[in-house]
Amino acid sequence: MLCLQVLSILLIATAALASEEDVLELGDNDFDSRLSEIDTALVMFYAPWCGHCKRLKPEYAKAAEDLVRNDPPVTLVKVDCTEAGKETCNKNSVSGYPTLKIFRNGEFSQEYKGPREANGIAKYMKAQVGPASKELKSVADLEKFLASEKESVVIGFFENESDLKAAFFKLADKLREKVQFAHSSYKDVLAKQGVTDAVILFRPAHLKNKFEPSSVTYSGPAESSDLNDFLTKNFYGLAGVRKSDNQREFKSPLVVVYYAVDYVKNPKGTNYWRNRVLKVAEQFAGKVNFAVSPNDEFTHELNEFGIEFAQSDKPKVAARDASEKKYVLKEEFSVESLTNFVNDLLNEKLEPYIKSEPIPENQDEPVVVAVAKNFEDVVVNNDKDTLIEFYAPWCGHCKKLAPAYDELAEKLKGEDVAIVKMDATANDVPPNYDVRGFPTLYWAPKDKKNNPVRYDGGREVDDFLKYIAKEATNELKGWDRSGKEKPAKTEL
């Protein structure tokens, strides 16, 4: 009976989490009339069969639950472009799914350019309504504001006009899409906090711990740049919760501990492991940055470190040093093993992890194959100008390029130029090559290998030849600088 009761409760809880009751569904018949009554709305134009839409929907619903209770509220709307909302989608120039747009009083305001997970959507949209800093008129307002936020917040307490107040509002306007700001000049609020002119960062209740204070008061110059530095340093604390929407804000050297981070379903279990990370992070404050990340949200990143995802495992640990080299804790996670790992990281005693295919046993083809483990040899130290293609085996554009690339390499046999390719999905790409799509090509002159130049020219053989003939360190034997083929030498 107990098991059945527990199962019933879990099913109800799961259904509640997946509910879309706070998302307003509109169509051609009511889109304009209903939207005109709403101050600020985020509209998702979708198709039921769209995979990206299916992945976004539960995050959208979670964000809607948060935003409908915001002050002022933000309404999240969805429109099915394949059925009841066809005309509305056409009128709003929807050409792909999902498309998200922000409307104010029924009028299109701007394209949505924020994150696509619940917390990120909520934070981005909260910044779109009201002033950059929320005014707190009473102690009850202060307590409600602190209780409602899921991340650190910044509050200014000002009895009178001051340089600090001016700097605070300037920064609040600049960071309104990233940080929640509030302020107060009311005597009872200032008395409650025991300050008259101060800016304080408050950490959310669920992240409070014995290793760091729950709030930090700014004590620097009354300049927005200095205040910004204070927030950057303190916002996430000793070990912040790193998710997909804020991952770029955690800078190297960085140690990340991956496990089932979930403050909704399992806050106690989440803090059990985080407190152990905090104990270690406290020892290395100012030397290394720490974070905890949900392992199911970073399966791709774990794969980049050669770590297999397993929901029930103990935490896994990966790190990057200041030069972005990667390292993995091989021992089972514990306070002691993590401490030793970080000490060895700082003392450069760890062997970097390199994701790489095996080095090819031979290089018989005109196009040289690079992998992470031989990249130094076949590109950096080959003493040749080098054209490198970073590709993906499944990429259609890469497959289309392959014959021309092979022909190019064949034509340039005997020249002081190497034509190289590398599977960027199976190998670590060096940090000075920015590869975000496939194929990506770079030109690396023989004497400037640390400063490769992205190739954005045509992809026919003649396009490549003209570019290489012009850019080659030494003039090619078979082509002049304009790319014109030189006449063959005849023997007398």
Image (cartoon, rainbow, N blue to C red):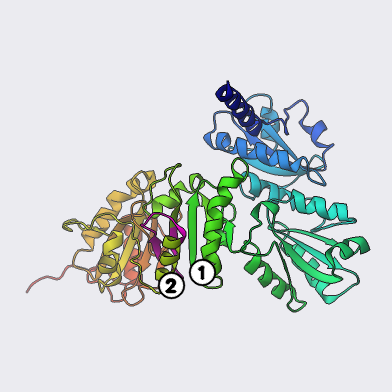
What whole-number distance in Å separates the C-alpha atoms at marks 2 and 1?
8 Å
On-image quarter of the N terminus? top right
Residue at 87%, 71% (x, y): give it: 196
- Identify the magenta region: 318-335
Observer-nearest residue: 332 or 172?
332
Helix, strand or loop status at disc 1: loop
Write down the quadrant of residue 116 in the picture. Answer: top right
| Labelled pair 2, 1 in contact (Cβ < 8 Å) | yes
Mark 2 highlights which residue? Answer: 346
Write down the quadrant of residue 349 in the picture. Answer: bottom left
Helix, strand or loop status at disc 2: helix
Observer-nearest residue: 360 or 94?
360
Q: Residues within 10 Å of mark 2 (few under 14, many from 20)?
A: some
Farthest residue to the right: give it.
187
Observer-nearest residue: 356 or 265?
265
On-image quarter of the C terminus? bottom left
Q: Amino acid at mark 2?
A: Leu
Residue 219's spot in the image, x, y percent? 74, 76
Mark 1 highlights which residue? Answer: 288
Magenta stretch holds residue 242: no
Magenta stretch holds residue 327: yes
